[in-house]
Amino acid sequence: MVSLQWGVANRTLHTLRGISDEGDAMARTVILGGGIAGHTAALHLRRLLPREHEVVVVTPNSKWNWIPSNIWVGVGVMDPADVVFPLAPVYAKQGIGYVQAKATTILPHGDAEDARGAVDVEHTSPERSGQVERLRYDYLVNATGPKLNFAATPGLGPDEGHTVSVCTAGHAEHAASALKDVIDKLKAGQRQTLVIGTGHGTCTCEGAAFEYVFNVEHELRQAGVRDLAEIIFLTNEYELGDFGVGGMEFEENGFRTTGRMWTESLFRERGVRAITGAGCTKIEEGVIHYELLDGTEHTQAFDFAMLLPPFRGVGLTAKDAAGADITDQLFAPSGLMKVDADYSGKPYEEWKASDWPSTYAVPGFDNIWAVGIAFAPPHPISKPRKSPKGTVISPAPPRTGMPSGVMGKAVAQTIADRILGRAKPPHEASMANMGAACVASAGTGLTKGSAASITMMPVVPDFEKYETGRDLGETKGEIGLAGHWMKLSLHHLFLYKAKALPGWQLIPE
């Protein structure tokens, strides 16, 4: 096992932990994961710190993927090259260390040789594939994102199952090819059934399925074959418009409407049939088996299916300095990392906005944080539901995109303050105080495209502060061509930001 060291001799643990009045003589921050949260944290931390302090990103991927645009790759209107770029040149230019590897074990107390925190990684680059290395750190940010848990539903997924996915650029490219085959069959006069949605009762990111189903519907209309296709949206949401955030209410011109009514109107307009409160139990070739919240079991035949998987932690473990397993101290059973949240398991009726983390610090460790999907939420946002058989059919809370970026920046600011010896409280980014904007594509085209633009404040409802849980003045929804232009603009804007091109830091998370 190789240990990555740096050339400063005889430093004490006191200095390594950033406790000195002047800040660390030199500190290393290791960031696990190069997605939105980790990449954002790395760029801001590098911007905020003098170059004698190290910022190192560990990620198994050689490329950065703007995941929100994968849905466009999945219908063939963009190529994978339009949504990814290589990380190494960006990090080299910014002075950020880059290790292409997957993290396997965290040693927060160090080991018998060194009391500094460490993380074991397994290299994934072609030239070092399989090699194991131990990296020392002063500060650690877990931004590994999720494991795509296709195995949770037998037959789910593009590799060993019978469905396609848009979770990665490669998956989306495969989905586009399968969709092209469907369109060719439709053009030949063969009727086709397309099922798009969630592949398990506990999935999150229903918004991605929402975007994809309407982009597929749009492409079929553009191809002139819509009348021969039945399109079905299969979702674990209790009702349309829930999106894993408990739904929304909008108020305009003195009238209120719900997210459900707003969403259902779009489904009726586009002729997409919805099956709600559904948890997939098994997928065979051409047949989806699912259970509804009422406990009944059903099947749905399909010719094409894009079903999202549930998420779980990537499988990190933790050990103390003697090598004993302490994984359960740092991680929830889901494999996601425990932070400053309320994990008491109290009933739904007692949930509060204050249950949610604000600093993302790991309890008991003053130099470890978890952000983005890597942190364990205290509970869902939507009301939890089970079928009479005990099957959980309820969305997990979304925390991708904008919230992930905001968390990453806040933690970077906290670490920079610590390293530079600034006596400031930790920066906060609670989803219970954070607004979010979502622009969900419903079809492309500069003159024929459309998108649903949704803003909400806050993401996690606060019923102690707001009658409906959210600020009605800041929670809105509309759909139209302008939304598509906004979605396309954001695609280019955030790729520009992620490449750290001049002025990137002026673009908000």
Image (tube, rainbow, N blue to C red):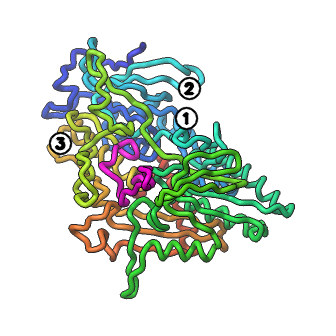
Report if the CB atoms under discs 1 and 3 are less than 8 Å apart: no
Q: Of tags 1 and 3, which is closer to the observer?
A: 1
The boundaries of the magenta stretch are: 371-399
Q: In what element is the residue under mark 2?
A: loop
Residue 160 part of the magenta segment: no
Q: Amino acid at mark 2?
A: Ser
Q: In what element is the residue under mark 1?
A: loop
Question: Residue 458, relative to residue 258: is it above or below?
Answer: above
Q: Earlier in the sequence, mark 2 or mark 3?
A: 2
Q: Residues within 10 Å of mark 3 (few under 14, many from 20)?
A: some
Task: Name the mark on residue 125.
Answer: 2
Q: Quadrant of the C terminus?
A: bottom left
Q: Amino acid at mark 3?
A: Arg
Residue 376 part of the magenta segment: yes
Question: Disc 3 marks which residue?
Answer: 422
Q: Residue 81, can we see it? A: no
